[in-house]
Amino acid sequence: MVRALPAAAADRPLHVVEAGAGIGTMVERLLDRGILTHALYDAVDVHQEAMAAAPSRLSAWAAAHGWEVESRATDELRMTRRDQQVDVRFHAQDVEAFAASQPRGNADLLLAHAFLDVIDWRRSLPNLLRLLRPGGGFYFTLNFDGVTAFLPEGDAAFEERLMTAYHQTMDGREPPSGGRYTGRHLLHALPQMDAVILDAGASDWWVRPQDGAYPGEEAYFLQFLVETVRTAVAGWGGIQPADVDAWAARRHAQIDRGELVYLAHQWDIVGVWRPASAV
């Protein structure tokens, strides 16, 4: 991704658009790795609570890492450090509405992290890509691709029915989402959207206890995932809610004992947008 970006300077800041920016953690990662030095960053998320929390959270993080922070508006921050300047604008709106409101062909980089599989990317992504200048880069990460597993397996037949039903709920969401095979479908569909894939690879999750405990916030993460499955699947495909509740109770107990292992298969994809009209 970095190799695909143009050099940034004070008179030519890098213009980044992030779809599904949440509370701003991607900005932190890019700053921490020295990727953002001179930049204009548009962070877009439909969730009002996330966009409301992001400026104060990012301000505190930046100040702790040696940046001077100026609030230029309730939804905009300017961060400076030595000769570097990064402006972040927070947009609390749907990504399609954002794409429709912005001039085309201005962005250098389009990011979507753990996001495209939860939206109808077939409808939204062509318009988001048009925000890029010809040759602009994109980096789409953690695109789910059809494998979820909780270990130890327990009742293998029930587990298979449960995971099948869970994946089917992804295909039947309303409003529509990317579906259970977003990762592989993106690999096929992006070239049809004038996008050139430079590289792709698996970015699988493997969450496991270490010495009988989970590092960081991983226990909370697992509890949340178990509840996500329980609420999605109850009553779906003939699976009885009581059976799902019993499964969830067993999984929560395994987390408490430091036993549960979680696996998920996902794809990361990086490339550039080269519309035929610009060739």
Image: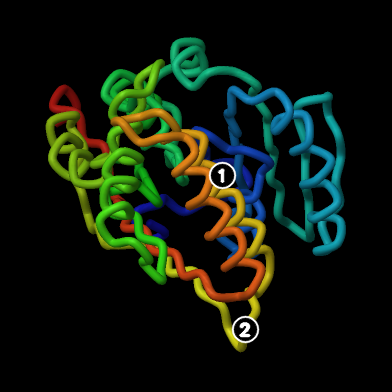
Crowding near the residue tagged with mark 2, few <14, some 14–19, many ≥20 C-alpha atoms within 10 Å: few
The quadrant of the image that shows the N terminus is bottom left
Give the quadrant of residue 227: top right
241 shown above or below 222: above
The quadrant of the image that shows the C terminus is top left
- Report x, y in % for residue 252: 60, 59
- Report x, y in % for residue 156: 28, 61
Residue 229 seen: no
The residue indicated by pointer 2 is 212
The residue indicated by pointer 1 is 227
Please, what is the three-letter code of the amino acid marked with disc 2? Gly
Crowding near the residue tagged with mark 1, few <14, some 14–19, many ≥20 C-alpha atoms within 10 Å: some
Residue found at the very far bottom of the displayed protein? 211
Residue 121 seen: yes
- Seen at 61% across and 88% down, the residue is 211
Please, what is the three-letter code of the amino acid marked with disc 1? Glu
19 shown above or below 62: above
Asked which colour scheme the image uses, the reply is rainbow
- Seen at 69% across and 39% down, the residue is 87
Q: Helix, strand, or loop for circle 2?
A: loop
164 shown above or below 254: above
> Viewer-proximal residue, 87 or 254?
254
> Viewer-proximal residue, 136 or 44?
44
Give how far apart the Cα atoms at labels 1 and 2 are: 22 Å
| 240 horizontally vs 196: left or right | right
> Viewer-proximal residue, 238 or 26?
238
| 247 horizontally vs 157: left or right | right
